Image: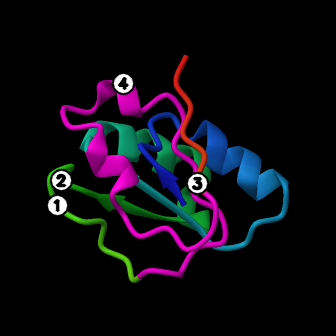
Amino acid sequence: MEVGCGQGTELLALRTLGFGRLVGVDASCERLRRVAAKLGSDARLELVVPENPLPFDGDCFDVVISAAVIEHTLDDRWEISERVNGEAMVGHR
């Protein structure tokens, strides 16, 4: 899953690496339309409201990516407050 899928760059990379079930979430309909144009039916795309929990059960993704997103959120705790059952790496440059 890519949180803040924007242009779909990371989802495209995951597809190239052979990941079969791709999911992208974003708070922008326009960004989701751009990703859909690139990935077609290869990805499930969800419009989300940053203040709400993500619409998925815990433990349902092998990989979660969120690149260059946290600095654009109003509440940067939103992204990292979701349940993580494994390792989490948060980076910001």
Question: Would you name the residue on which mark 2 appears?
Answer: 49
Q: Amino acid at mark 3?
A: Ala
Question: Would you name the residue on which mark 3 appears?
Answer: 88
- Residue 59 versus residue 6 in the image, above or below: below
Seen at 55% across and 66% down, the residue is: 41
Q: CA distance from mark 2 to mark 3?
A: 22 Å
Q: Is residue 15 visible?
A: yes
Question: Would you name the residue on which mark 1 appears?
Answer: 52
| Image quadrant in which the C terminus is located | top right
> Would you call the spot at circle 2 few (<14 residues within 10 Å), some (14-19), or many (20 or more)?
few
Seen at 41% across and 70% down, the residue is: 83
Q: Amino acid at mark 1?
A: Asn
Relative to 34, 8 lies left or right: right
Q: CA distance from mark 1 to mark 3?
A: 20 Å
Q: CA distance from mark 3 to mark 4?
A: 17 Å
Q: Amino acid at mark 4?
A: Glu
User: Which callout, 3 or 4, points to the residue nearer the camera?
Assistant: 3
